[in-house]
Image: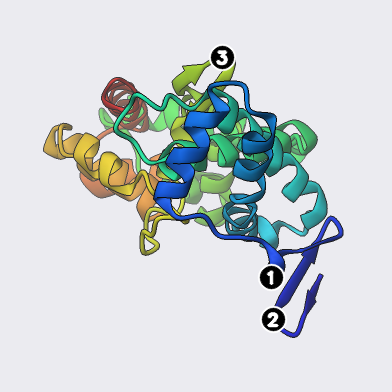
Amino acid sequence: MYNNHKVVICGVNTANLKVLTEQEKQDLMIRVRTGDREARREMICGNLRLVLSLVQRFAGRKENLDDLFQVGCIGLVKAVDNFDITKEVMFSTYAVPMIIGEIRRYLRDSATVRVSRSVRDLAYRALQVREELSAELSRDPTSDEIAEKLGVPRQRVVAAMDAIVEPISLYEPVFSENGDALYVIDQLSDTSRDASDESWLENIALREAVATLSPREQHIIKLRYFKDKTQMEIASEIGISQAQVSRLEKAALQKLKKQL
């Protein structure tokens, strides 16, 4: 709930929350590792604004912000309990993907996407027509050609084809510790926004990982995740089949997984 620039969430007025310096965080984490419960409480409370800033990313989903804030706090607590103070990494760098990962798991588990029967039927008809046109033309047909053959608008065909492709590769864990996983989608989302210490601290690491890909893999990842294009659209644009795009995309994500 917002009121005169104050944010009250889960009954907490976040305007009154303390903001810790990096040195204070380091000192508190040293005490936390000795079993100091008060230091643990201070560390959690001192990073609630970080949770709030990340929760705002999901406000457009019409989810209850109180619920998302509580879920994000679970990720924060796990980050505090598992952070390795011997590593040369800022706490927020470690905590951000943990918090976002917790929220995304909650959203993924509570809102399963269901594909309608009509969309599935159109997708399977499109697959059949694609095979027929491939044999007829001795090449992979474009989405426009498939749509013309079906007598259906191209946008509907593309959407239906994408709807039956499970985005499993996006949820491949790229990092896991004590049961907490960081997924590929957590690294690829919102990378077009300006990076800041409390918004997307993994941006630099992602760019470095993408730089290790081949030019074609980089181009496909850019079109797929930064330009929001479908595999069919990419296939038509660069002149290869949708199946080849899918294979190249999976290979690129596997390389990113290893790099990250």
Residue that extends furthest to the right in the rendered view of this protein: 11
How far, Cα to Cα, is label 3 from label 2?
38 Å
Front position among marks 1 and 2: 1
Q: Earlier in the sequence, mark 1 or mark 2?
A: 2
Name the residue that disc number 2 marks.
5
Name the residue that disc number 1 marks.
15
Element marked by disc 3: loop
> Picture quarter containing residue 55?
bottom right
Residue 108: x and y, percent? 69, 35
Residue that extends furthest to the top in the rendered view of this protein: 178
Asked if disc 1 and disc 2 are in contact, CB closer than 8 Å, the reply is yes
Q: Earlier in the sequence, mark 3 or mark 2?
A: 2
Write the residue at 59% across / 40% down.
99
Write the residue at 17% across / 37% down.
216
Element marked by disc 2: loop
Q: Amino acid at mark 1?
A: Ala
Height in image: 163 above or below 143? above
